């Protein structure tokens, strides 16, 4: 997709002068960026450049020191993590957050708590309704798994501990997708996997995106081949500041980006 076509899309999320300080350390420094609706945006930068901190701020895990975050034009800066989730923003983490003794179904279904009725009275006194609710969620998880990776659907009631890393990554992503988000934040999905495994998982994501709806993605990733293949636009951070923006081809030839990654003058 051309840069001109991207510019005609409405902004889905925007950060204005976003700053995050931890004592004397400034992790985000007056950061201005946006992601367009339906776009796949790559967020790049050396380790410690502020990428994951940005995710933590916009998802309500950290409260920004100053600046603003807008989602569909509405302020999101002071929203709690639950409020961000209810606004249809979900994410994955660098390190696995799965409960290994629980089944694939259990780990994915917990991501649908926007719609899952878990009230005690509902569960105790409306057993037929509870059974119908349970069946609905089972069908929803099964349908998502069949779309994402049909082989994994056959393991829906197996414990996650019995599965390899690539399937655990798939489960984490499915947990983020089960609530049908408008914005999906992927934080280094290749962590702990081989190059070939990463390509498989990214193929799964693109397949789901093409079959259900073109949800927006912000992707943090160090594997440049993946960034080149997946993204339409990239933003590069260094020391919490935006130092470059453009297509993959534009940012890899940017001198300031090369210095940030290689330490060359």
Image (tube, rainbow, N blue to C red):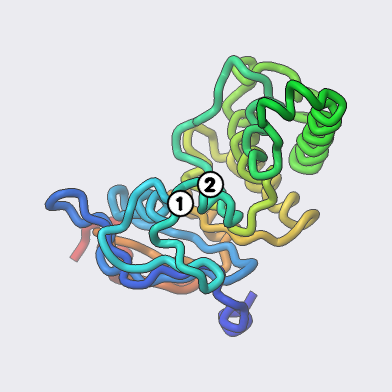
All told, the count of numbered labels is 2
Please name the residue shown 49% across and 31% down the image: 96
Horizontal relation, residue 154 to residue 186: left or right: right
As drawn, which residue projects farthest toward the left? Answer: 24
Q: Quadrant of the N terminus?
A: bottom right
* Along the viewing direction, whichever of 107 and 158 lies nearer the viewer: 107
The reply to whether the C-beta atoms of the residues labelled 1 and 2 are less than 8 Å apart is yes
Circle 2: element type:
strand
Please name the residue shown 74% across and 50% down the image: 208
Q: Circle 2 sits on which residue?
A: 91
Distance, label 1 to label 2, CA atoms, is 8 Å
Q: Position of residue 82 (x, y in %)?
A: 51, 46
Mark 2: few, some, or many residues within 10 Å (few <14, many ≥20)? many
Q: Is residue 19 above or below residue 106?
A: below
Foreground mark, 1 or 2, reads 1
* Along the viewing direction, whichever of 145 and 18 lies nearer the viewer: 18
Circle 1: element type:
loop
Q: Circle 1 sits on which residue?
A: 59
Q: Position of residue 253 (x, y in %)?
A: 39, 70
**N-term mark: 1 or 2:** 1
Q: Position of residue 12 (x, y in %)?
A: 56, 69
Question: Quarter-wise, where is residue 26 in the image?
Answer: bottom left
Please name the residue shown 28% across and 49% down the image: 48
Question: Quarter-wise, where is residue 65 in the image?
Answer: bottom left
């Amino acid at each position: 997709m051309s840069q001109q076509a991207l510019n005609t899309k409405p902004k889905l999320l925007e950060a204005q002068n976003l700053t995050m300080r931890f004592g004397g350390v400034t992790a985000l420094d007056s950061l201005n960026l946006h992601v367009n609706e339906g776009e796949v945006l790559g967020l790049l930068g050396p380790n410690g450049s502020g990428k994951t901190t940005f995710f933590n701020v916009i998802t309500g895990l950290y409260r920004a020191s100053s600046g603003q975050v807008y989602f569909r034009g509405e302020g999101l800066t002071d929203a709690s993590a639950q409020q961000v989730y209810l606004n249809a923003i979900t994410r994955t983490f660098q390190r696995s957050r799965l409960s290994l003794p629980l089944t694939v179904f259990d780990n994915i279904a917990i991501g649908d708590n926007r719609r899952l009725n878990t009230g005690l009275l509902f569960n105790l006194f409306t057993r037929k309704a509870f059974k119908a609710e349970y069946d609905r969620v089972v069908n929803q998880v099964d349908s998502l798994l069949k779309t994402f990776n049909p082989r994994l659907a056959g393991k829906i009631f197996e414990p996650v501990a019995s599965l390899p890393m690539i399937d655990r990554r798939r489960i984490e992503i499915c947990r983020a997708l089960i609530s049908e988000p408008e914005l999906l934040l992927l934080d280094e999905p290749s962590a702990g996997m081989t190059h070939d495994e990463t390509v498989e998982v990214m193929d799964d994501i693109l397949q789901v995106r093409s079959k259900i709806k073109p949800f927006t993605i912000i992707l943090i990733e160090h594997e440049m081949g993946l960034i080149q293949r997946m993204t339409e636009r990239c933003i590069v951070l260094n020391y919490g500041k935006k130092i470059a923006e453009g297509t993959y081809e534009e940012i890899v030839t940017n001198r300031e980006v090369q210095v940030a990654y290689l330490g060359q003058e």
